[in-house]
Amino acid sequence: MDACLKSSTLWAHFKQLHLTENMRVRLAGNNSTAAELAAFSEILLQVGEGRHEVDRSIDRDFVKIPQDMSIENNDDDREESEDEEIRPGAVPRGLKKIIDVMYADINDPDIAMDDYFVNRTILTTTNTLVHRIKEAVSKRLSGDSRVYLSIDKVDDDNEEYFFKQEVLHSININGIPPH
């Protein structure tokens, strides 16, 4: 606790500012986007303040997600080949449905690819699942694919014994493709 800002001798000189305007809403490209962002921001605020509706049929701590912000995943949509368990390299069926909705028009020639991926995000809890999603979305792209390989060699041959290849291959860092 001694390392926090409020414990600092400089705290008395800080000026506390309160945010009053949602800049994402203000800078939205059009009124429709601004309205969506404002509605989403309001729901997040309600959840944070404990004012949002909960689904008491499940538990008092479960937030009820608005219908227009959820993706229905009926068992009818399920492919027979998908297992209940998540196999290594497989995309879970609920996630497959999300990918279907989020990237439905991925091969539409009229869409500007520069903005297409920037405006779509699927958040996950692990890098492993991120790589599965990237692979699943990549398979949907039309056209030729390219594979770029990394190198398994250190610059200085004297340092070769410090870095075992198995260890280097197991490293999985955010923002860097797997080896």
Image (spheres, rainbow, N blue to C red):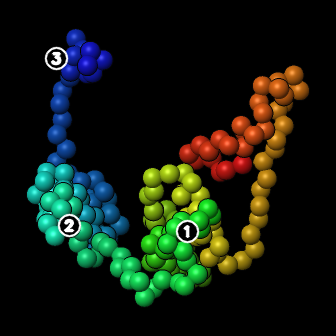
Image check: 170 left or right of 107? right
Identify the residue position indicated by label 3 in the image: 12
Proximity of marks 2 and 3: CB atoms separated by less than 8 Å:
no
User: Which amino acid does the dot numbered 3 rest on?
Assistant: Ala
Identify the residue position indicated by label 2 in the image: 58
Callout in the foreground (1, 2): 2
Q: Is residue 128 visible?
A: yes
User: Which amino acid does the dot numbered 2 rest on?
Assistant: Ile
Image check: 149 left or right of 16? right
Specify few, some or many for label 1: CA neighbours under 10 Å numbering under 14, 14-19, or 20 or more: some
What residue appears at the point 82 percent right and 32 percent down from the top-left corner? 154
Along the line of sight, the residue nearer the viewer: 9 or 61:
61
Badge number at residue 3: none
Identify the residue position indicated by label 1 in the image: 91
- C-alpha gap between disc 1 and disc 3: 52 Å
Image check: 112 left or right of 49? right
User: Which amino acid does the dot numbered 1 rest on?
Assistant: Val
- Where residue 101 appears, as percent x and y from the top left, is 45, 78
SS class, disc 1: loop
- Where residue 122 appears, as percent x and y from the top left, is 45, 62
What residue appears at the point 67 percent right and 78 percent down from the top-left corner? 142
- C-alpha gap between disc 2 and disc 3: 46 Å
SS class, disc 3: helix
